[in-house]
Image (tube, rainbow, N blue to C red):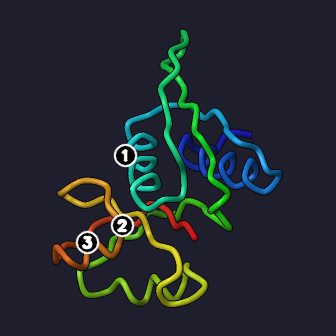
Amino acid sequence: MKHSILSDCMATLKNAESVGKESCVVEASKLVLQSLKVLQRKGYIGEFEKLEDNRGGKFRIELLGEINDCNVIRPRFSVKKDDFEKWEKRYLPAKGMGFLVVSTPEGVITHEEAKEKGTGGKLIAYMY
């Protein structure tokens, strides 16, 4: 059952990691691309490439065995620059473990980067 492309991507990543696969394939979208760039920058996934097909494309993602849990945050709560701690406590298991993915006017970034830049945004996902 399809929920959203990003939700399906996160479920695929988590399930493929849990069974020990080396790679997985997910549907492509701009939001998935930006989220994958954040995950790659933080060291949770390896390289990924776009595969073309007749329905818009897919991404093949190299898995590194670093993902314990990930999921989208629904609804996409708005968060102010000073309110990230409340959401960290809600979605992350411990302080300093994992990160929230946030859509800001400056692009899709982690909550730590948003704190540094002093900007708020919409919560998209969490990963640890």
Residue 17 shown left or right of residue 82 in the figure: right
For the point 44% across and 34% down, the residue is 29
Question: Which residue, given by chain and number where applicable, does mark 3 sit on?
Answer: 114
- Per the image, label 1 sits on a secondary structure element best described as helix
Residue 8 shown left or right of residue 86 in the figure: right
Figure quadrant of the N terminus: top right
Cα distance between the residues tagged 3 and 1? 15 Å
Q: Residues within 10 Å of mark 1 (few under 14, many from 20)?
A: some
For the point 61% across and 84% down, the residue is 93
The relative height of residue 68 versus residue 39 in the rendered view (above or below) is below
Q: Please report contact status of discs 3 and 2: CB closer than 8 Å, yes or no.
A: yes
Q: Residues within 10 Å of mark 3 (few under 14, many from 20)?
A: many
Residue 50 shown left or right of residue 62 in the figure: left
Check disc 3 and give the amino acid type: Ala
| Extreme-right residue of the structure | 19
- Per the image, label 2 sits on a secondary structure element best described as strand
Check disc 1 and give the amino acid type: Gln
Check disc 2 and give the amino acid type: Thr
How far from the left and from the top, in percent, is residue 94? 56, 89
Numbered tag placed on residue 34 in the rendering: 1
In-front residue for pair 7/52:
52
Q: Residues within 10 Å of mark 2 (few under 14, many from 20)?
A: many
Question: Which residue, given by chain and number where applicable, does mark 2 sit on?
Answer: 110
For the point 50% across and 36% down, the residue is 48
